[in-house]
Amino acid sequence: MKIKTISRTEEDYTRKSKLDIVKVHRNRDPALHPFERAREYQKAVVATKLDKIFAKPFIGALDGHSDGVFCSSSVRNKNVPFITGACDGELKVWDLSRRVCFWSAVAHQGFVRGVSPDPTGATFFSCGDDKAVKQWALEPLDTDAVKPLSTHTATHPLTGVDHHWVDQQVRARPTALSLSRFVFF
């Protein structure tokens, strides 16, 4: 029975002082590496495939938020009004076909935790760290000074908001510490 081992002494690979150069042993003889050309070819093929995969998946960016986007939503029937809420409390309503912002407003103090449009697509609701649920018009009359249509305050911070698909009910999800439920009719 043959056992092949590689023995190395630690003294050959450790530096005696910080100024010593680390010795790297390489053998560039192609006879010792018969599959080197095949390995390099395989690496080149994989790199080319990855370049093709990641070449054009990106269609466009919705630039404009100064902080990270935490939540987003769109109306079920149409994708044109796309709503995003950022970590700095800013809401933006986008036109996806033109990649422009309809309007934006600083809606909450702190994170915008959830946005949810109603089924008609005329208004949407947002909730944030400031314990408020606000109703907004998707197409306000004055886009320079956008104000909420209504504001409701909860007793605890909210983690999300949802709208019923048929009935006029809005449910806000409270934090895990709170057991109360927030329902508007």
Image (cartoon, helix red, strand yellow):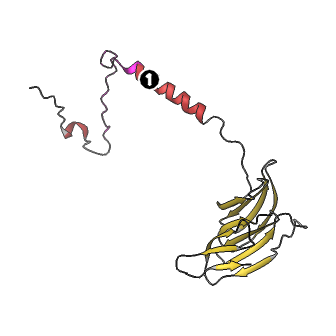
Identify the residue at image location x=67%, y=42%.
58
Question: Is 56 rendered above or below residue 28?
Answer: below
Q: What secondary structure predominates along the stretch shown in magenta?
A: loop
Q: Nearer the viewer, residue 176 or 43?
A: 176
Question: Residue 46 at what x, y percent from top left?
Answer: 50, 29
Mark 1 is surrounded, within 10 Å at the Cα level, by few (under 14), some (14 to 19) or many (20 or more) other residues, namely few
Q: Residue furthest front?
A: 166
Question: Residue 177 at what x, y percent from top left?
Answer: 52, 80
* Residue 88 visible in the snapshot: no
Q: Quadrant of residue 18?
A: top left
Question: Residue 57 at what x, y percent from top left?
Answer: 65, 39
Q: Is residue 29 left or right of residue 100?
A: left
Q: Quadrant of residue 170?
A: bottom right
Q: Which residues are magenta?
A: 20-37
Is 27 a magenta residue? yes
Q: Quadrant of residue 74?
A: bottom right
Which quarter of the image is occupied by the N terminus?
top left
